Image: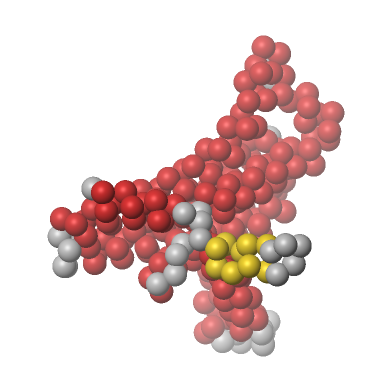
Amino acid sequence: MGNLSELLMEELNCETAFTIPVFGGIPVAESVVVTWVIMAVLIVAGIFLGRNLKVENPGKRQIAVETVVGGLHDFFYELLGEDGKRYIPYLMTVGTYIMISNMIGLFGLKSPTKDVGVTGALALMSIVLIEYSGVHQKGAKGFLKSFAEPIPIMLPMNILEVFIRPLSLCMRLFGNILGAFVIMELLKIVAPLLVPIPFSLYFDLFDGFIQAYVFVFLTSLFIKETIE
């Protein structure tokens, strides 16, 4: 258990990949570097998949891309409706990033979502978008008035909920990814040969997909609740 504690502390430790030699040195965390790698992969993939698109007689690549993108768009549109369709591109982008981040451990890189700073930033961006959606839909006056609904006595609880939501999103994602790491290390101790392999695939693939889905699904529900 001592080794497990050391491994856990090492995993929680946000290592510095390198330091930018300006203003006395700006440390760049490993999770930030891996995020840059993911961003580069997504940009290259977007350029490759988005070129030579055709209105008539599309190729197999275009059909596959349109099927995936169209399916995701329809899924979020059913959740958010016409008033919330402007937020769909953000949700699709964040969901894709989280899914790849959770699965990138298969390539020997540390998942950025194991860094509470990354999950906290994602949760903060989502909560800003959620509150913005309320202001955009109801106006500043109507948005502030909604904190006293359904009855004025709910005002403190509704204000507190603004701070609870990002904490919930952050710790749900971070805790599940970290919990998967702990389970994998325990399995390696109990059965170090064959047993961890299928579980590793499960946590890196299926569970990684589920966590991405839950994050964007909850964000969608909060946006829908705010704009109604």
Q: How far from the left and from the top, in percent, is residue 198? A: 24, 65
Q: Say above or below: 44 vs 86.
A: below
Q: Residue at x 64, y 45 (%)?
A: 124
Query: Which of 40/224 is in front?
Result: 40
Q: How far from the left and from the top, in percent, is residue 138? A: 79, 35
Query: Which of 86/3 is in front?
Result: 3
Q: Is residue 79 visible?
A: no
Q: How far from the left and from the top, in percent, is residue 84? A: 69, 47
Quadrant where the image shows the C terminus:
top right
Q: Say above or below: 106 vs 12.
A: below
Q: Residue at x 84, y 28 (%)?
A: 141
Instruction: Say left or right for 47 vs 204.
Output: right
As drawn, the residue found furthest toward the top would be: 153
What is the total number of numbered labels drawn onto the structure image?
A: 0
Q: Residue at x 49, y 66 (%)?
A: 100
Q: How far from the left and from the top, in percent, is residue 204? A: 37, 63
The image quarter in which residue 19 lies: bottom right
